[in-house]
Amino acid sequence: MTSPRTISFEIFRYDPQDPNDKPKMVTYEITEAPGMTVFIALNLLREQQDPSLQFDFVCRAGICGSCAMVINGKPTLACRTLTANFPDGKIKLMPLPGFELIGDLSVNTGKFMRELAERLQLWLQPDANDIDIHRLESPMDPAEAAKLYELERCVECGVCVSACATKQMKDSFVGAVGMMKIARFEMDSRDTRSAEDFYHVIGNQDGVFGCMTLLGCQDACPKDLPHMQQIAYLRRKMAQTIVSC
Amino acid sequence: MTASSQTQTQKIHDVSSKGYLNPIWAARADKLQSATGLLLGFFIIMHLHFESSILISKDAFYHVAHFLEGSMFSDNGQGFPVTTKFVSAFMLIVVLVHALFALRRFPAQIQQWRALRSQMTIMPHQDTKIWFWQLITGFLLFFLAPVHLFDMITNPEIGPHLSAERVYHQDVWMLYVLLLPAVVIHAMFGLYRVAIKWGITTKRMAALKLAKVMVVYLMIIGIASLLTYIFIGQSLELPVTPFVPS
Amino acid sequence: MKIIYTDSLVVGAGLAGLRVAIASKERGLDTVVLSLIPAKRSHSAAAQGGMQASLGNTVKGMGDDEDVHFQDTVKGSDWGCDQDVARMFAHCAPKAVRELANWGVPWSRITAGDRQVVVNAEKVTITEAEKAHGLINARDFGGTKKWRTCYTADGTGHSLLYAVDNKAIEMDIPVHERIEALSLIHDGKRCHGVIARCLVTGELRAYIGKSTTIATGGYGRIYEVSTNAIICEGIGQALALDTGVATLGNMEAVQFHPTAIVPVGILTTEGCRGDGGLLRDKDGHRFMPDYEPEKKELASRDVVSRRMTEHMRKGKGVDSPYGPHLWLDITLLGRKHVETNLREVKEICENFLGIDPAKDWIPVRPTQHYSMGGIRTNATGESPQLAGLFSVGEAACWDMHGFNRLGGNSLAETVVGGMIIGKYVADYCEKNTLEINTQVIDNSMSKLQAEIDDLLVGDGTENVFEIKLAMQRIMMDYVGIFRNGIELEKAITELKDLLQRSKNIGLKCKKRHANPELVEALRVPRMLRVALTVACGANARTESRGAHAREDYPQRNDKEWLNRTLSTWPNENALEPTLSYEQLDVMKMELPPGYRGYGNDNAVAHPDTAKRETQIADILAELGDDADRYDKQAAIMPFDLPETLRPRNERLSDTIAVSGEK
């Protein structure tokens, strides 16, 4: 075996709560280990070099969506990014743009997603009369269930929001995550909202008609969700909707 | 304080505040932009092909031009050059409608421009870059296309010699040198974007490749035609006499 | 001092916590949820395979009902569970599944007609009933008689958490994110709330509620390698332990999951084996039938994990730089199945191992996975010692899992337990008033403030990260799958030493706000106390039961150890917990202790077992022939539930007679 190489991390550092602090890039060096991920490396850096380094990890398995950051120009999940993917051994880490910065690599995606869910009413709105948990459930087409799960795989990591130039230019734009979720509920046969109801939420310049199809969302999504198809579907659906007002 | 509870509910969006009194205009604007774009895109493809018939021969171009001017409806077989006037006027309207709705997309404030530039620096991304060039070419076309169309309205005569005169002796080639790449890039990537935007195709990579191939192809025939007109123009003596097919 | 008042305070925004919050809010109570992270990032999302509920829709689940689910759960627990609670749970699980369907979970559904499945390494065709078309499907899981695990592909926890959090958002339940509860406010009899620290600003706040529900998950991260999220550090258990009054139950009951990938310890779902995946050794030999001819790969987790370890100890493991491992083979399921029903597994294999599980074998070994132990509660979810303190989900020892939890029963516990206990929490809030004793609040606040000041301005020298790693290694080395007295003694001695050293932690980063080192320094001593309850409980329990396997005491000893370990920490300066025991009453059991049907059959019988069996036979004989299963059950072991959850569950088999396995 060849001796392990040294890799360098250039990390964005800034503590917005410290009035004397200014944004800067700081470089750290670390010895690479086999199978090392950015998660492992950042923890080692915190434990051995700088305990003030802020970042967010929860599941460390690519499931929870906490750890998205910009890694060498690509927004993605840090926990499942192997350091071996970078042959020159140089890794530059930036926090996700477009979110409130908590400090260093930590951003407030949670607040963003909650506000979005409230704004777009991102929950199932079934027929309230049809609910009896003691009785046999209503059947659902197996293909529909499978399709809904495909769309549900979003982990709200915020990558699509950061990768979207439209969103970066226009703060009020809902971004791919919002549209994908609307598309998910629109396709759900249990949801009682009409196309017109959805139109009033998403049929505007901040919604599906503000999207310029730059596809940063689709290209960066760590879950490979079909943004292009779904947003196109939603756009067609909304464009056909007759709105009374 | 980060508690999300503190974010109060501004539940449904007030659409009327977004510049459209009736929310249906959001859909209409998007549809009209795409529809006019589609029309313009296909028009350009046809236009450049017709134009390039000069590569075959002067005769070919002569017949194409007269055919399009409605030669079969005219007694003398010469067609009506006024057709060009009307078509140009119509296209000018289409261009203006397209531009009007496309303007929504332009970064209107300097912060938006900066956000776009910084986005492209921090996270380089192919489709964003392509759109950026559409933005730039769109901006150029906003000025160049009307100039060309006005020219065709006021000066609708088309023919192997007349067009060559325009290109070479009236120095319009300088306009075409800018117009050709701008319109080809804008139109081909515009068609690509319309196709994926409305889900006309889901084969994005193939569509993108086709758009790139089309850009190269249209540039080649466009440049070749332009050069041909320049050569013809050079060979003509002033005042130019219209070409008569043999 | 910032004080926030509410009716129902919930700590932890995973499935269990959110479900309790929803139940509180449904009754019009003011509800606040505290969470370290955004709710949808909670570890509940990581549950892949599914949740058990005896719907009995699929042909392989026909004949399933609450009775069978109850029996599987009790056997799985190695008779360590509270049978009343297991009954409450089994009865409400189908309700929870159906409720979740109405909240948006896209449960995988049954397609009528023939379909091919893999059972015991062979392709089998099963035929689903026409009437079952579109109803909720179920897959096979370890330790169950029927196919009972309802699922959405292999992202069940994700789907559930999103649906439940969406419901909470719809109900406008506030979740205070990035808030860490660090001590309970109590007067020795009643719990009044928590003192919590904001991880961003460093601010300390008192949250005061009529009820306080701890739903913070397990304590897996006291081990170095665990399938758990890195936030599952047992701080919730420490909250209760540090009161000196509340008890923790069965802390030594720690589950090791058979199939976590090597070396990072990320889980691949039990659904892999449930759907027909096999375990193979270094020779490619399928070894589980050699040990467990009946259930093979699908014995309960404790048994499979031990068999794997045994097999590796025989030198049959595959050597790797990270020690020996075995193979999980799901290639025989076919690419289509892997890419639809096991796609999270596929993603994990691709990203962390660089392999394609549809064609390559997955390197796996048993890894810490679940905490059966937790805050001891009675059947209503309330601490027997501190009124107003509730606990639910993995954080609790409500005790439906005893000494081993069945796969698919933890996700189920979060939503079923949350549903049931949520109602009891709401009852409590309605019956009780908010008691505000500023002196008690002040004291708790000052104590935590002093702890923080000491860390920031004190002259400690110990490195918190070193202490944490040392603790995690001790737990790995000496309190693992197989345990023995010598190693456990060693673990206790070393952990006590670490606890002593942790009183002298010094910090390099002196910031009061957003300081990751301070966060660790506050957690590590708490984790050490929790780790000591595990090690001491394990050392004291001189028998083997469920996941607690003593090499020096290999028998399950019902005669002496049919009880629940209770740990308290009455003296805060002590270096180890005080243990006591709560007897399980065989004479009240619906299912007296017996053989589980898998694993070793070597139990020392309890003297009451035979007596209770005769008694049950008598009760049944008295009932007469027309008694149905509900009458029989009620006669043997009546159990209580909130009224709205009592109705019987309708099943497909109630309306049609279905048969038909080809």
Image: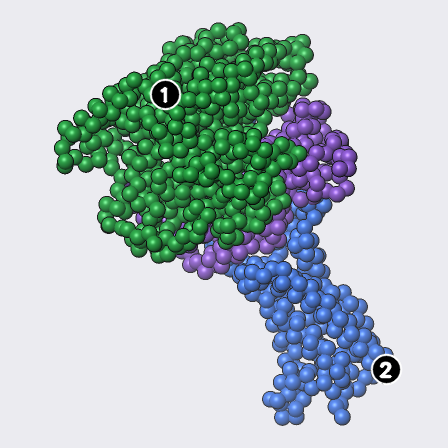
Chain colours: A purple, B blue, C green
Q: Is residue A132 above or below residue B210?
A: above
Q: How many marks?
A: 2
> Looking at the picture, do discs 2 and 1 lie on one chain?
no
Identify the image quadrant of residue C72: top left
Front-lying residue, C635 or B173: C635
The image position of residue C484, as x and y in percent, is 51, 18
Q: Residue at position x 78%, y 74% from top?
A: B224
- Give the quarter of the figure containing the N terminus of chain B: top right
Horizontal relation, residue B242 to residue B33: left or right: right
**Residue under numbered circle 1:** C604
**Residues under labels 2 and 1: Cα distance?**
113 Å
Horizontal relation, residue A235 to residue B45: left or right: left
The answer to whether residue B99 is visible is no
Q: Secondary structure at mark 2?
A: helix
Q: What kind of residue is marked 1?
A: Val
Front-lying residue, A112 or C38: C38
The image position of residue B76, as x and y in percent, is 66, 93
Front-lying residue, C280 or B145: C280
Horizontal relation, residue A136 to residue C343: left or right: left
Q: Is residue C340 above or below residue B71?
A: above
**Residue under numbered circle 2:** B235
Label 2 crowding class (10 Å Cα cut-off): few <14, some 14-19, many 20+?
Answer: few
Which of discs 2 and 1 lies nearer the camera? The answer is: 1
Label 1 crowding class (10 Å Cα cut-off): few <14, some 14-19, many 20+?
Answer: some
Q: Is residue C491 above or below residue B129?
A: above
